[in-house]
Amino acid sequence: MTFRFVDPEVGFTSDVIRDPRRFVGRTALIQDSIAALNSSQGLIAIYGKRGVGKSSLMRQIQALATGNYELVRKAGLAHLIPSRPRKYYTVYYACDSMIKDASELIKRLCNDTDPEDGLLRLVPDQGKQLSEFSRTNEDQVGLDLKLLKWGNKGQDAQKYSSCVPGDLIQTFRNFVSSIVESNNRLFSKRDSVLILIDEFDVIKDKTGLGSLIKSLTSDKVKFGICGIGKDLGALITDHQSVARLIEQGSVNVRQMSPQETASIFETASLLSGGLLKFTISAVERIADLSEGYPYFAQLMGKACVTEANFRGTNNIDDIVLEAVLDKIRTGRAFPNLESQYQNAIGSSDDRALLLTLFAEQSRDTTEYDASIGRVILKQSRSAALDLGIDYIDQLVPRLIEERYGPVLEKVPGTRGSYEFTDPVFRCYVKLRKVGN
């Protein structure tokens, strides 16, 4: 077959997956998502480790919420689609570390003008969609948020009648409560508004957020939150206050099975029009090396297509994969992970070796908790001494300091027990050759 260049992005992406055609596996999670969306009330809470595909699942939930059930049919779950599924107007917002607390989050939501995901695009102005807004004082959202009448060029700004001066929470409440009734007059009728908040874990002070979400939730307003956490308590501080809301909405995203990881490559082949051909052995090796983290599998897939293009072939076999692995071993494959690696080890080969020992700590030992990637310091001491590393306790601090990552964090309530903050980085370290 004649070689044809294939854009690696056709079949693989390191970004959040929004296209249902690219989303694979996760049948149980899709089933949970259908149930959560079609309950009249309740909080959707998506949590799990880095790199497992939480944000991609949330984007698929957003598609389902608008009535796009293509993913469900593709997964063979069409029989679970209700005769009249609930439909939502959706808001999607990804937090950043600059958000300090609940008030800051609500302010961001009230100010978000994103044309596809922002809250303000849905807020009505005398029954019409908002197209612009002006602001005289960023600190007084309730008092100074002004909406320009849609379609009337040059008309004076008019205050939105439901704003309450100085009361940020009430302003937000009025905004969301107005969305369904007003927009249903103009568009196909929907049941509720779904506010999806991604990267929820980066909010510095989450005190009171659970109570706030509970107070704002109604048959017309549903929230979905997504973030890194081993359990719901790690994601939302006062989770007891929303316990009843999450009976059908708690979604724990775990690593993919080898079969699900393999389906990433089957899908990539289909998206390329059948040009890309992956051997079974190459896919099995990638599934094993990526340890169920779809983000790392996607990175390796992209690297394999790039290497195959360089070699003038559309067949990705063990030879192509081995070339990619050689680049990973020598730090030439993934710049972001390599930068993280260099920042962690500094100029110390001993620290690099110690980090590798941590990453390779046997999964078979009874002291290793595979569910959270835990490593026990004492298990690496004898191996480190055998390799000539005499001062292990002097090498560890850099690995847990925030300015250098951190790549490890101490497990609370334990002695000498750590876990990788990013399990995808752990996969990378296991492949990275020390001394290059």
Image (cartoon, grey):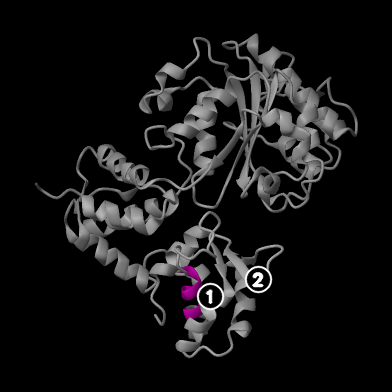
Residue 119 visible to the viewer = no
Query: What amino acid type should be assigned to the residue bearing mark 2?
Result: Arg
Residue 155 or 335: which is nearer the viewer? 335
The kind of secondary structure the magenta stretch mainly shows is: helix
Residue at the (58%, 12%) spot, across then down: 187
**How dense is the environment of label 1, judged by Cα within 10 Å: few (below 14), some, or many (20 and up)?**
some
Residue position marked by numbered label 1 in the rendering: 379
Q: Position of residue 308 (x, y in %)?
A: 22, 57
Spatial separation of the CA atoms under disc 1 and disc 2: 26 Å
Residue 262, image quadrant: top left
Residue at the (9%, 46%) spot, across then down: 1
Residue 173 visible to the viewer = yes
Residue position marked by numbered label 2 in the rendering: 403
Q: Is residue 358 magenta?
A: yes
| Labels in figure, total | 2
Is 158 on the left or on the right of 299, as rendered?
right
Q: Give the mark toward the camera: 1 or 2.
A: 1
Residue at the (62%, 45%) spot, across then down: 227
- Which range is magenta? 353-359
